[in-house]
Amino acid sequence: MRLRDAGFLLAFSTAALPWGALLLGRVGVPRDLAVWFPLVFIFGVVPGLDWLCGDERRNWETPAQAARLENARYFRILTLLVLPLWLATLIGCGWQFSHLPLGLAGQAGWIVSTGVIGGVLAINPAHELIHKSSRLEPLLGGILLSSVGYPGFKVEHVRGHHLHVATPHDSSSARLGESVYAFVPRALWRNVRNAWRLEAQRLRERGRSAWSWRNEMVNWTLLWLALAAAFAIAGGPRSLLFFLAQGVVAAATLEVINYVEHYGLSRRELAPGRYERVSHHHSWNAPQRYTNWLLFNLQRHSDHHAQARRRYQALLHHADSPQLPAGYASMFVLALLPPLWRRVMDHRALASTR
């Protein structure tokens, strides 16, 4: 188990990618080209590393083993360390954006690269943290999400997505035949709207105003505005543009992954508006070892939906869950090519819902 445990340190490796891009610029690669290096690594090199490292299908075998995994502080510390690492990365990338002599292509590359890294290094660990029952972990998850301008995910994902997944009521479950280009704008808009609605409803049920200071969405939005103001004060309009744009890219990256995780799967409707219980059959699973290290076992998504409180290190691989033909990095690229995506995925989705 020790090698598998140490592998989760790779989750921090994406923080080094911007500095790899800067190094390429210093050794002669044109800067406007070098800044795209993080995307080349994530979507070009990671699939190769998945192939080299193989699959991880082992599970804990006894409740005692599961308890030891759940209670091991090492795994929890890793997710807590993400916050300072990501904020340092975000600030460093913002400073570089304000000072590097980049053309339009280079500026776009730096923003998109930082945003995709934010999807991996900020939103993905935040997803782990917001599901936990302690006070500290959801708090850190909310800060991570605010840093990319998508704090509504903290509210909607837990109270909306996990309730309605694989039904027509879920904004983060892509329908069979729906393209990623139709899905992502819809998901971004509806998930933000749903988060505000859910918080307003919660407060009204407790006899409080929707604009109370107890409204999570108000507080997280104020934090996002404070971060935006800090970037604007520190680096001017150019720095503010960077902060806002990287957040849009990070949120869009998350929703592309949501598209991959739930495409075409549905729960049986038992009665009007009432669906079968969520199980590990209602999201896509992937066993690639390297990407699961990189993403804190996010690809064991089927078990996450069956046991949402279970910590990432204890998630199970289910051989009878719908299985993706490749890891998330490969499937992300495939999703951007709708005709090829449908050729690969539609028949798998239909077979999984029978």
Image (cartoon, rainbow, N blue to C red):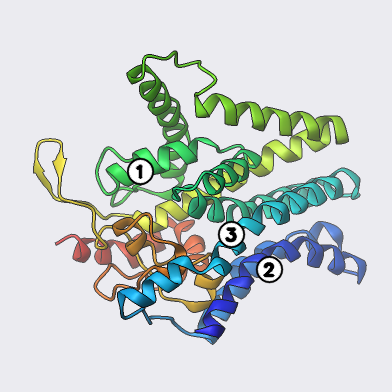
**Residue drawn at point x = 46 percent, y = 69 percent:** 313
Classify mark 2: residues with Cα within 10 Å, few (<14), some (14-19) or many (20+).
Answer: few
Residue topped by disc 1: 161
Identify the amino acid type marked 3: Thr
Q: How many marks?
A: 3
Tell me which numbered mark, 1 or 3, is placed earlier along the sequence.
Answer: 3
Identify the amino acid type marked 2: Ser
Residue topped by disc 2: 13
Residue 211 coordinates in the image, percent (x, y): 50, 15
> Label 2 vs label 3: CA separation?
13 Å
Residue 127 coordinates in the image, percent (x, y): 49, 51
Q: Nearer the viewer, residue 218 or 192?
A: 218
The quadrant of the image that shows the C terminus is: bottom left
Residue topped by disc 3: 79
Classify mark 3: residues with Cα within 10 Å, few (<14), some (14-19) or many (20+).
Answer: many
Tell me which numbered mark, 1 or 2, is placed earlier along the sequence.
Answer: 2
Q: From the image, state whether disc 1 or disc 3 is nearer to you.
A: 3
Rendering quarter of residue 262: bottom left
> Label 1 vs label 3: CA separation?
22 Å
Question: For the residue labelled by badge 1, is the local secondary structure a helix, a strand or a loop?
Answer: helix
Q: Nearer the viewer, residue 156 or 247?
A: 156
**Residue drawn at point x = 27 percent, y = 49 percent:** 166
Q: Nearer the viewer, residue 111 or 278?
A: 278
Question: For the residue labelled by badge 3, is the local secondary structure a helix, a strand or a loop?
Answer: helix
Query: Measured along the vertical axis of the image, is residue 318 above or below residue 265?
Result: below
Please give left or right for residue 265 compared with residue 327 in the image. Answer: left
* Residue 117 in view of the camera: no
Q: From the image, state whether disc 2 or disc 3 is nearer to you.
A: 3
Q: Nearer the viewer, residue 126 or 240?
A: 126
> Label 1 vs label 2: CA separation?
29 Å
